[in-house]
Amino acid sequence: MRACYPKSTIIAGYSEPSAVFLIRGDIVLAQGSDVPRFLAERPGSLAVVDLSEASRLTESLRAGAEPPVEVACVTGNNLFTGRGNTLLRIYAKAPLSTDPACAPPARYRCPVPSAAVR
């Protein structure tokens, strides 16, 4: 997905150092409430939002921020904290690329859309 979204990435609620190494590039660690402004100011960027920050993202949208588009979801176990089934939702600013190579594989499609962007 890096080729489709080459700009910086904001990560809200997931501050494991491994994320910085895996994503590479310019990374900003922030809160969910920062996501809409970040994406609006940086087209071509991605936002990775941990479930723990979803409510802050939702509150910023209720306050009038432009909703991002949900691109993908990733679930897994956080081996460092012992938290099972960590859910990360990945967002971008519309319009999304129509290039088929930019569509996430089926295993990363969100099973249920985020309440934040409905």
Image: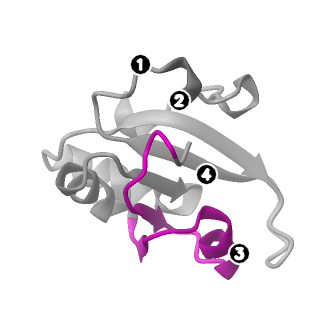
Alpha-carbon span between mark 1 and mark 2:
7 Å
| Residue at the extreme front | 3
Q: Which residues are magenta?
A: 3-31
Q: Which element carries disc 1, helix, strand or loop?
A: loop
Alpha-carbon span between mark 3 and mark 1:
30 Å
| Residue for badge 1 | 98
Callout 2 crowding tier (Cα within 10 Å): few <14, some 14–19, many ≥20: some
Alpha-carbon span between mark 4 and mark 1:
23 Å
In this picture, is 43 found above or below 101?
below
Residue drawn at x 66%, y 77% as measured from the top left: 16
Mark with earlier residue (2, 4): 4
Alpha-carbon span between mark 3 and mark 4:
14 Å
Callout 1 crowding tier (Cα within 10 Å): few <14, some 14–19, many ≥20: few
Which numbered circle lies on residue 18?
Answer: 3
Quarter of the image with the N terminus in it: top right
| Residue for badge 2 | 102
Are the residues at dot 1 and dot 2 in contact (C-beta closer than 8 Å)? yes
Mark with earlier residue (3, 2): 3
Residue 4: say if magenta. yes
Is 93 or 85 nearer to us in this picture? 93
Is residue 50 toward the left or the right of residue 17 in the image?
left
In percent of width and height, residue 23 lies at: 60, 63
| Residue for badge 4 | 88
Alpha-carbon span between mark 2 and mark 4:
18 Å
Q: Amino acid at mark 2?
A: Cys
